[in-house]
Image (cartoon, rainbow, N blue to C red):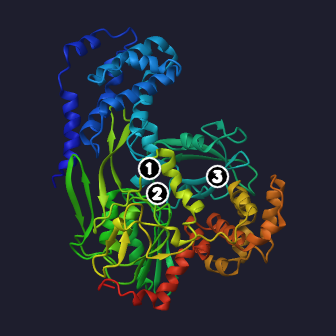
Amino acid sequence: MFKPKQFFFKALAIVLLSVPLSSSAQSDLASADDDGYNSLETTIKFRYVYTYVDGYYVDKVNTSALTKTAMKAMAESIDSTKADKWVRKFYDESMPMASFNALFEELHKVAHDSIDRADLVDHGIRKMLEELDPHTGYFTSAQYKEMNTPLKGNFEGIGIRFQILKDTLMVVNPIPNGPSEKLGIMAGDKIIKIDNETVAGTGLKNSGVRDRLLGKKGTQVSVVIQRKGVNELLDFVITRDKIPVYSVEASYMVQPEIGYIKLNNFSATTMKEINKAIDTLKGQGMEKLILDLQGNGGGYLSTAVDLANEFLSDRQLVVYTEGRAFPTDKYFANTLGSFENGELIVLIDQSSASASEIVSGAIQDWDRGLIVGRRSFGKGLVQRQITLPDESAMRLTISRYYTPTGRSIQKPYDDGLEAYYKEKYSRYESGELTDENKIDFPDSLKFNTLVTKRDVYGGGGISPDVFVPLDTTTQSDYFYDIIRKGHLNTFSLTYVNDNRESINRKYKSFEKYRNDFDPIKNGVINKLTKYAEKEGLEFDEEGFESAKDLLSVRLKASIASNLYSSDKFYEIINVLNDPLQKAIELMNSGEYQKMKLAMNN
């Protein structure tokens, strides 16, 4: 199928590469330094960025002024005291690209070998794009690859979940069917050496682990492992492979007839995972579904449309986009969905963004289900990822998206990048997270749903149909400290590693563990507090007592994650998930049915 937008961007790249160079540019190429340096080759990336912004950014912008911003950023990276003087000397509003190149030449002469010329241009590009909106940005090649790993649905490596414990790299779990599991590497193994390099006790960081263990499929890495109960060190040669990254974090029946799916992003593999989860839950008797999008920051627009399609009827509008360089583009539900009938509740919170808001907005606008929780983040800008000549990339906002009723849910960003991202935290200070009456939308942002004509609002996220306040009554500073400083996670890992066999003997299955393991009754929670005290956290009896039940559940869930698998964490921790518990109540009490939503319920 012909896709004009994709073609347009590819065509532009071809045009940029095929435009004949001017005589002055040809002269620049001919007069390169002995080391092969010339300004045209170094600054061509900026030319790409400038052209894309000028032609395709969602709003018309003053690209000449933006170039001036980029020039100042470059100059400040060399000498902030002279930056304004350099910009005044070289900036010509009518010739932005020539101005940029001229300043670049000057800065290169001043700094010469003391700077990386590519870094100099990167400074300018990064600052220029930051001026546009909070979601347009620049990424180095390494950042771009790491950023896209969760959305691609896989990465290439040895297949382990790991944690650095006491300066030692420990395997938390081998990923099922991955190369490490197939070789017999086990949870609790300590990796002492990687490719003959000692990594234990050397201050290794997470990034250093990834640098050493990630790599192309088919390449090999050798590791030396210390295993509890085995006297000698164990040698393994692991052949790297594709390792799946799952977007469905948990899927299980929370009650008879009620299924639960926790989705953490919208990736290339999401729909395959969702359909498998729904089929499995239906096989277990699911007639009602709770979809948890709390904390889900989004992902691919196409995946959001596909997911909404599973719940909406044929030809119902899911979302539409509009941009300066692009006509209105409408996305419809176009196939038979896997859960078009049955009660549906979507959970959201202040960190649910982008694709999460597309899905929840469409479901709310068509009265297909209920939205439960707290107001979502408020991201209604659509980005296109564009790879630049050196494999770095930019994300450029090209459109705004609108829910089926016409709501734009993008929150304001006039006060700058920092204020924009802090806004979701300021909701706590304003009282919005604990009191729904603190949310104040003007009538100008009011819309009506398409079936029952209920009031909904745009202009700053999706507001839930049923508000669930953030519970702060059972928490304490001591609770936060024991979590934030990593004591609970570290203790859980150590506890499981030291007691794995005895726990497995006592609790023959996860179900028995879930029902019978009680950190308060068996004294494990006291071991946690003693461990934290030994690590430097002073015991606070009052803070402990006020948060003891909460801390017990967190501890039990963390142990389950290390003992079984990460999805079991949610089966334990969800007793604290107030929006989920409210959703179950709505379905069981008959309140959902009383709301008389869309006919396909």
> In the figure, is residue 228 to the left or right of 160?
right
Query: Who comes first in sequence, dot 3 or dot 1?
Result: 1
Is residue 255 among the parts visible in the rendering?
Answer: no
Q: Is residue 564 above or below residue 341?
A: above
Amino acid tagged 2? Val
How many badges with numbers are in the image?
Answer: 3
Q: Amino acid at mark 1?
A: Thr
Question: In this view of the protein, which residue sits in the foreground, 254 or 297?
Answer: 297
Q: Quadrant of the N terminus?
A: bottom left
Q: Is residue 482 visible?
A: yes
Q: Assign the C terminus to one quadrant of the image.
A: bottom left
User: Which residue is at the front of the view, 148 or 292?
Assistant: 292
Left or right of 571: which side holds 5?
left
In the image, residue 464 lies at what x, y percent?
44, 72
Identify which residue is drawn at 60% across, 47% down: 236
Disc 2: which residue? 245
Q: Quick check: 316 above or below 331?
A: below
Question: Does the CB distance between marks 2 and 1 fall below 8 Å?
Answer: yes
- Image coordinates of residue 472 in percent, x first then y, are 65, 69
Are the two marked residues, 3 and 1, in contact with CB atoms closer than 8 angstroms? no
CA gap, disc 3 to disc 1? 19 Å
Q: Residue 35 falls in which quadrant of the image?
A: top left
Numbered mark located on residue 163 in the image:
3
Residue drawn at point x = 65 percent, y = 65 percent: 558
Task: Name the residue carrying label 1.
Answer: 149
Distance between mark 2 and mark 3 Cα atoms: 17 Å
Near mark 1 (Cα within 10 A), the count class, few <14, some 14-19 or many ≥20, is some
